[in-house]
Amino acid sequence: MKKLLLVAAIIAIAAPANAQLFMAWNACDGTPGSSRSNLNFDCTPGSGFAADLYGTFGSTAGVVAIDGIIDLAFQGVTDVPAFWHFESGGCNNSGMGYTFARGSATTFCATTNSVLFCGSTGSGCGGGVVAYVNGSQVPLGGPNRARLLFTNARSATSPVTLPAMPTRVFCFHLMFITDNTPGSGGADCVGCETPTEIWWHQAILYNNSAQAGGEGLVALIDELTVGYAGRVQVNGYPTRVTAKSWGQLKGMYR
């Protein structure tokens, strides 16, 4: 129900002026060793390659839940390649991992990126990836698009007030592995080398002030309105794509 209410409220709620979304490879954006540049996946069978993508954001609010939209677009193909089918029952459903646990050390997330929404081990939160869909299921601008939806949720009785920018809040760590590329002995999912763009499209922040026992929308942070720090490339992707709004997914919840 929360998603249905959001469709109606999305126009009225804006992101704080200092809000922004950030994604980077290897470490949280702004931490030594992090990169927003193109990352070439090693799709060689048996390479043991893994890619780590970190998401952080800047905002300030008393928050109990975060919903997020991460979009993917694939260049030069007419559908989502098998390697990028991470949904349940998809060819590569074990090829992507998600966690809202940052870990206790700040090696990958320097001080200004180390503030936690969930506990360092993920304690105090529930949720995770709630859906992974492609353009043949829900209109996303073309059948060669995919969308990941995630939720990080604290107890409604335990909101956390987040610091304002320039401090950034740790949100997620995505992991991609290539164990299922053709010849690797896995599921032989083709398309690992496909040029791909990944962008953190939106973060939706909620608090518990709307009504007793309910949740209220406090901020919508849209990557397209606050800059392109929440955008990375895989195997090169020179063509900018246009994101679609959450409202286009409302049919999923009917």
Image: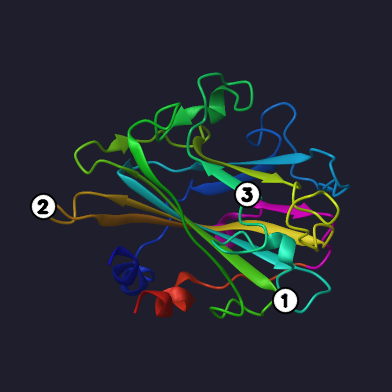
Q: Earlier in the sequence, mark 2 or mark 1?
A: 1
The image quarter in which residue 105 lies: top right
Residue 232 among magenta residues? yes
Residue wearing tag 3: 96
Label 1 CA crowd tier, 10 Å (few <14, some 14–19, many 20+): some
Q: From this view, report whether residue 247 is shown above or below residue 130.
A: below
Tell me the quarter of the image containing the C terminus.
bottom left
Tell me the SS state at disc 3.
Answer: strand
Q: Amino acid at mark 3?
A: Met
Q: Quadrant of residue 163?
A: top left
Between disc 2 and disc 1, the foreground one is 1
Q: Residue at x 27, y 67 (%)?
A: 1
Q: Amino acid at mark 2?
A: Ala
Q: Position of residue 58 (x, y in %)?
A: 49, 42
The amino acid sitting under disc 1 is Asp
In the displayed image of the protein, which residue is found farthest to the front? 185
Whether residue 233 is in magenta: the answer is yes
Is 33 displayed left or right of 27 in the figure? right
Residue that carries the numbered disc 2 in the rendered image: 212
- Labelled disc at residue 241: none
Q: Position of residue 96 (x, y in %)?
A: 63, 49
Residue 79 got which mark?
1
- What is the span of residues highlighted in magenta in the rendered image? 222-239
